Image: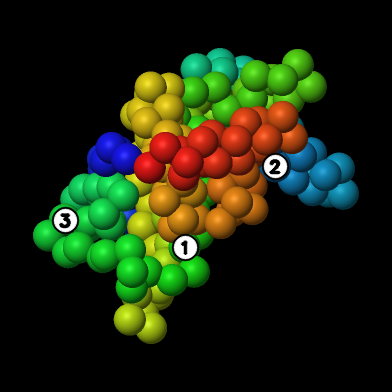
Amino acid sequence: MRTISFNAKLFTPGKGISWKITSRRLMNFSWLSFMLIVITSSYFELNAYYDYTVTLTLIILFSLMPIASYWGYHAKEYKYGKLEGYLSITTDGIAINEKIYSWPEIQDLQYKVGHTLNELLFDDILFDKYRYYGGPAYSAGVDSYISFKYNDEYFKFGFRLESPSHLVQYRNLVKSLYYNDYLPLNKTYEGLQLEYEEIQILKEAKRQLKQTS
């Protein structure tokens, strides 16, 4: 059986809280501040000077909402962290930079397949309107990860899927792990979100490969 490989950039989440301004945060700040001022000012009698200041502030906050909406409609998802290092997965093992983890010692393998870079986060008609409420509209592509135990130590590595073709490479790699008995059937079809017909095709493909090997 031929060796299939998959390579990707590692994504390490940042520690603490990022205070970077995003379209979603701008929308939330504008809306919550607007409502807080309206509710608070309704309980107090304001003189002309303060009434003018409050009105001006409300106008500014209200004007920020369509700006945040437009920004979110076109914005890419912001993920606090950094792209550093490389992940390589083959039917021989998992390599993280210079460290190699061989399959015979890997236990409890888990994985998640997320969006690819610049993929629409919501393309369903019911959820697409979310983009108008501060977005973001497009994915940063770093929602995928692989985790496992190795010599009784737990590891979890996030990585970025660069494109639809990159995702296809990863899906083919996962199927290859199943064909080589490194992944059980349930983790394979759950992770790849396969339908019943696709599961049957996967099982039949493995059966035929075993017969010809």
Residue 109, numbered label? 1
SS of the residue at dot 3? loop
SS of the residue at dot 2? helix
Tell me: residue 18, above or below residue 117. below
Disc 3 crowd, CA 10 A, few/some/many (<14, 14-19, 20+): few
Quadrant of the image occupied by residue 98 = bottom left
Q: Quadrant of the N terminus?
A: top left
In percent of the image, x 83 and y 44: which residue is there? 39
Q: Which residue is mark 3?
A: 97
Closest to the observer: 165 or 71? 165
Could you tell me if residue 184 is visible in this image? yes
Give coordinates of residue 64: x percent, y percent.
Answer: 58, 24
Instruction: Tell which tag, 1 or 3, sits nearer the viewer.
Output: 1
Amino acid bearing label 3: Asn
Closest to the observer: 10 or 169? 169
Q: CA distance from mark 1 to mark 3?
A: 19 Å
Instruction: Tell which tag, 1 or 2, sits nearer the viewer.
Output: 1
In percent of the image, x 33 and y 69: which residue is there? 104
Asked if disc 1 and disc 3 are in contact, CB closer than 8 Å, the reply is no
Amino acid bearing label 1: Leu
Q: CA distance from mark 3 to mark 2?
A: 45 Å
Give coordinates of residue 37: x percent, y percent.
Answer: 73, 42
Left or right of residue 141: residue 89: left
Give coordinates of residue 69: x percent, y percent.
Answer: 60, 21
Marked residue nearer the N-terminal end (3 or 2): 2
Q: Which residue is mark 2?
A: 32
SS of the residue at dot 1? strand
